[in-house]
Image (spheres, rainbow, N blue to C red):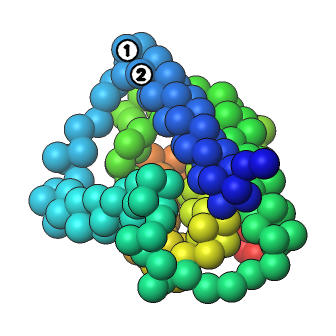
């Protein structure tokens, strides 16, 4: 019989590979069909912050999958049913990611900057939430913190929620307001930033 922790770790590895595959497909398609905004245009500080926070998070995820004993000190206890529910939530985030990327199409940008030739997308998940990609990514990270029962990933999740809500979203929405003006203001008035019911 397979160890339940091995089953969780294997499942997360498969889910991560699917997430990266879906993301790579849609991002490559968007890059090949139009305007590409370089990450360098966001500035050196943003690039440094991405590396400082992104690389350690990736390292923690890989350790949790391939060498979990290295992070035994960062574990907390949870009932198996809660872990299973979190794994199902993580798998659900794959569907959300696909829906978001399919809806945004070639408008996707890997920066907070807006494409000059981009359209304001208000259909699909964007009908309910202005930043469903961020919302699904944060939910995914939160789910993984529970699957792995890992305080480090949980801390990243909570810090990520604050960082996106207080820094990233305002910066991106400033760009969107400059690009789409009153149309975006109207859209803001009827949708939540990360959750549909919170304006």
Which quarter of the image is occupied by the C terminus?
bottom right
Label 2–label 1 contact, CB within 8 A: yes
Dot 2, how many residues are within 10 Å of its Cα: few (below 14), some (14-19), or many (20+)? few
Task: Return the x and y of residue 36 as percentages of the image width and height.
Answer: 31, 29
- Residue 28 position within the rendered picture, expressed as x and y whole percent measured from the top left: 41, 21
What number is the disc on residue 28? Answer: 2
Residue 60 horizontal/vertical position (percent): 40, 65
Q: Quadrant of residue 47?
A: bottom left
Q: Position of residue 84 (x, y in %)?
A: 81, 61
Residue depicted at x 53% and y 35%:
17
In front of the other: 122 or 160: 160
Residue drawn at 47 percent across, 65 percent down: 68
Depth check, front residue: 56 or 33: 56
Mark 2–mark 1 distance (CA, rounded to whole Å):
6 Å
Q: Nearer the viewer, residue 157 or 65?
A: 65
> Does the rendering let one see residue 151?
yes
Task: Return the residue at label 1.
Answer: 32
Query: Please, is residue 196 above or below residue 131 in the view?
Result: below
Q: Residue at x 45, y 53 (%)?
A: 66
């Amino acid at each position: 019989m397979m160890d339940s922790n091995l089953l969780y770790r294997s499942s997360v590895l498969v889910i991560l590979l699917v997430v990266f595959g879906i993301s790579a497909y849609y991002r490559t398609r968007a890059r090949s069909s139009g305007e590409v905004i370089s990450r360098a245009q966001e500035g050196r500080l943003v690039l440094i912050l991405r590396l400082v926070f992104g690389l350690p998070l990736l390292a923690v995820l890989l350790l949790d999958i391939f060498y979990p004993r290295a992070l035994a000190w960062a574990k907390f206890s949870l009932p198996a049913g809660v872990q299973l529910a979190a794994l199902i939530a993580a798998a659900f985030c794959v569907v959300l990611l696909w829906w978001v990327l399919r809806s945004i199409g070639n408008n996707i940008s890997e920066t907070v900057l807006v494409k000059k030739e981009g359209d304001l997308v208000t259909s699909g998940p964007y009908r309910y939430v202005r930043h469903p990609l961020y919302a699904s990514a944060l939910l995914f990270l939160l789910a993984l913190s529970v699957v792995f029962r890992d305080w480090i990933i949980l801390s990243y999740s909570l810090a990520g929620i604050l960082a996106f809500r207080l820094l990233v979203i305002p910066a991106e929405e400033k760009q969107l307001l400059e690009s789409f003006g009153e149309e975006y203001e109207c859209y803001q008035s009827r949708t939540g930033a990360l959750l549909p019911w919170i304006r």
